Image (spheres, coloured by chain):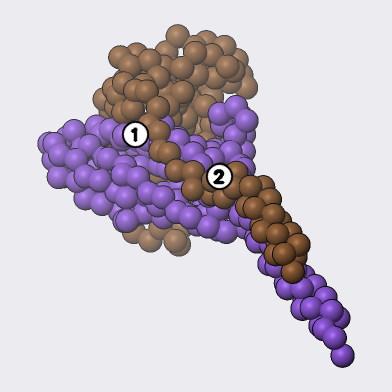
Amino acid sequence: MVGRIKVAGLIAALLVIFLPSFTLAQDVNFSVSPAVLSIDNLPPGEATEFELTIHNKEELAHNFTIATFQPPEEERRERRTEFPDDSWISFSTQEIEVAANSQANVTVTVAIPQEQKWAGEDWEIWVGVAAESSDLLAVRLYVRLLVSTNPAMEARSNAGLVAGIVVGIILLGYGGYYYFRRKAKPE
Amino acid sequence: MKVVITSIVVALILALILSLPALAQESGTITITMTGVNEISISLDKTQWPLGNVPLDTEYTTSPPIEWCTLTVEGNCNVNTFILGEDAKWVDNPSAYKWTLSTDGTSGENVYGLWFRISGDTTRGPLSDGYVPITKTQDEFWPYAGGSSLAPGNTKQFGLKLLTPTYFVGGRQMQTQITISAVAA
């Protein structure tokens, strides 16, 4: 009986593991601004940028990571659709160390490819900032990024069409002019 | 001759008049707007839960069970908050061994369960006891089911529950992370 208990105890000891056991408390308190940012009239084929500020409110320096996140439909603002491609958003750095009680800026660039189908759209994507930590609980703050493209891409196509018509009219006019001039010449 | 030239000039003027609005649209300026109040921040007063040695298929709850950690809305905007879990990985070799996070809070072989419960919430979750499984999909923390978002200064207390796998390889230190996130409401 005693032997069985010993074996059972040994098995239990072998199965025992350590779940997170850390020595230092590393609470993270930080803020991100802006919380909501709207970019309007961004023409396809062009890019714009803005500064995202991370404020580390702790007494210790922290590393922060920055990444995009596609929110589910129910979390998006009304009439906003999914941002088509995360790679259109880039950061001056995806990881930054912010000293204690100080802040740092990250430049976010939004570039839309020059294609007709991206004109006149209203999208939403989130930019997440997280403090690197090995603790069980971590915090991530999202910037709600609302991007509206300019319908000017369509206008640009129309402008090309108009230019083409103008050139056509000029060529036709000159052709007609020389034709009638030659026809009118006495033989 | 004169008729032809006059026609060309008139056509050109007409074409330019028609294309002017379109050309004017092209020169529209890009506007960047930071809407209203503009700093987002939440804080947690506790981030660690050291459990030490744990046996198979055993349930652990934080102490106190549902007022273990306090989330405080710091910034100056109302927020919606979310919670996300992940697999627990072996600290010495994370790619070699893990416990998969359960999709419904239950446990299995090398599968563990995680739950949270917000203080004052006694009806939420599959068992209607206030405990909600934490999964690898980012889910609502607060509000849920169309409730009110949290305003600056608001707090929410919550606790965690962990269910160890029914089988796992012993003697390995495992590590996991729960991410609580916030976005402007």
- Circles 1 and 2, Cβ within 8 Å, touching? The answer is no
Residue A187 seen in the figure: yes
- Residue at 26% in and 52% down: A96
Nearest the camera: A37 or B17?
B17
Q: Are marks 1 and 2 on the same chain?
A: no
Q: Quadrant of residue B72?
A: top left
- Label 1: which residue? A34
- Label 2: which residue? B25
Nearest the camera: A106 or A160?
A160
Looking at the picture, how far across and down is residue B17, in whole percent? 63, 47
The amino acid type, in three-letter code, at marker 2 is Gln
Q: Quadrant of residue B37?
A: top left
Nearest the camera: A114 or B17?
B17
Label 1 vs label 2: CA separation? 29 Å
Task: Report in which chain the residue with disc 1 lies.
Answer: A
- Residue at 56% in and 31% down: A76
Drawing shade for chain A: purple
Residue B64 seen in the figure: no
Task: Report in which chain the residue with disc 2 lies.
Answer: B
Taking the view exactly as shown, the residue that stands out farthest to the front is A186
* Left or right: residue B63 compared with residue B24: left
Tag 1 secondary structure:
loop
The N terminus of chain B sits in image quarter: bottom right
- Residue at 49% in and 13% down: B148
Query: In the displayed structure, would residue B37 be above or below residue A88?
Result: above
Query: In the displayed structure, would residue B150 be above or below residue A130?
Result: above
The amino acid type, in three-letter code, at marker 1 is Pro
Density class for disc 1 (Cα within 10 Å; few <14, some 14-19, many ≥20) is: many
Provide the letter of the chain coloured brown: B
Looking at the picture, how far across and down is residue A133, in whole percent? 29, 44
* Left or right: residue A47 compared with residue A148: left
